[in-house]
């Protein structure tokens, strides 16, 4: 069963282009890297780094210190009914913690084919509009409004 605590990582380049990845199980569902904790006590930053590596092949520990940043923002949202089977009975809400990750302009992306089928780099305003989840778009806009 999935733990209803997750991370969202907005990956971006110095020119403010943002990486979006398309889910394999939902055509047209574009998003940032997301994923649930593996254990209730898993460190949030470690979970974020793990999910980034699993979904994009980017090794956070190979990037400059501070590339991964906790945005110190969290939201609580209702889990889509079609995905509630992944959680314990009666779990309907998830808490998501937001992170950002600045990557080199020449970073290579290696998608996990069972999870994602395509990726694109978009200017951050366009990326925010392209996200299926409104809160994902909000995370992107919040990141760049603070810079």
Image: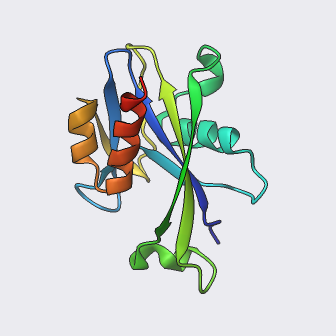
Residue sitting at 47 percent across and 35 percent down?
56
Q: On the rendered structure, is 5 left or right of 9?
A: right
Q: Quarter of the image containing the C terminus?
A: top left
Is 92 located above or below residue 96 in the figure? below
Instruction: Tell me where residue 58 appears, x and y as whole percent.
Output: 52, 28
Q: On the rendered structure, is 67 left or right of 25?
A: right
Residue sitting at 42 percent across and 39 percent down?
111
Residue sitting at 66 percent across and 38 percent down?
45
Quarter of the image where one finds residue 133: bottom left
Instruction: Tell me where residue 128 appears, x and y as whole percent.
Output: 28, 42
Instruction: Tell me where residue 130 appears, x and y as whole percent.
Output: 22, 46
Render colour scheme:
rainbow
The answer to whether any part of residue 31 appears in the image is no
Instruction: Name, please, the residue furthest toward the front.
Output: 146
Quarter of the image where one finds residue 60: top right
Total count of labels: 0
Residue sitting at 42 percent across and 33 percent down?
143
Is 116 located above or below residue 106 in the figure? below
Q: On the rendered structure, is 109 left or right of 118?
A: right
Instruction: Name, please, the residue furthest toward the bottom.
Output: 90
Instruction: Tell me where residue 42 appears, x and y as whole percent.
Output: 75, 50
Q: Quarter of the image containing the N terminus?
A: bottom right
* Closer to the camera in the image, 77 or 91: 77
The answer to whether any part of residue 8 appears in the image is yes
Is 110 located above or below residue 83 in the figure? above
Instruction: Name, please, the residue furthest toward the right.
Output: 41
* Closer to the camera in the image, 10 or 116: 10
């Amino acid at each position: 069963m999935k733990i209803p605590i997750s991370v969202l990582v907005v990956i971006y380049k110095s020119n403010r282009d943002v990486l979006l990845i398309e889910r394999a199980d939902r055509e047209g569902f574009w998003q940032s890297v997301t994923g649930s904790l593996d254990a209730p006590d898993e460190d949030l930053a470690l979970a974020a780094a793990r999910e980034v590596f699993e979904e994009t092949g980017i090794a956070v520990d190979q990037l400059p210190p501070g590339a991964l940043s906790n945005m110190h923002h969290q939201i609580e949202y209702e889990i889509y009914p079609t995905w509630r089977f992944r959680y314990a009975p009666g779990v309907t809400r998830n808490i998501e913690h937001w992170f950002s990750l600045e990557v080199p302009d020449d970073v290579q992306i290696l998608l996990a084919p069972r999870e994602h089928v395509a990726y694109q780099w978009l200017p951050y305003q366009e990326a925010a509009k392209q996200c299926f989840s409104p809160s994902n778009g909000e995370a992107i806009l919040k990141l760049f409004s603070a810079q």
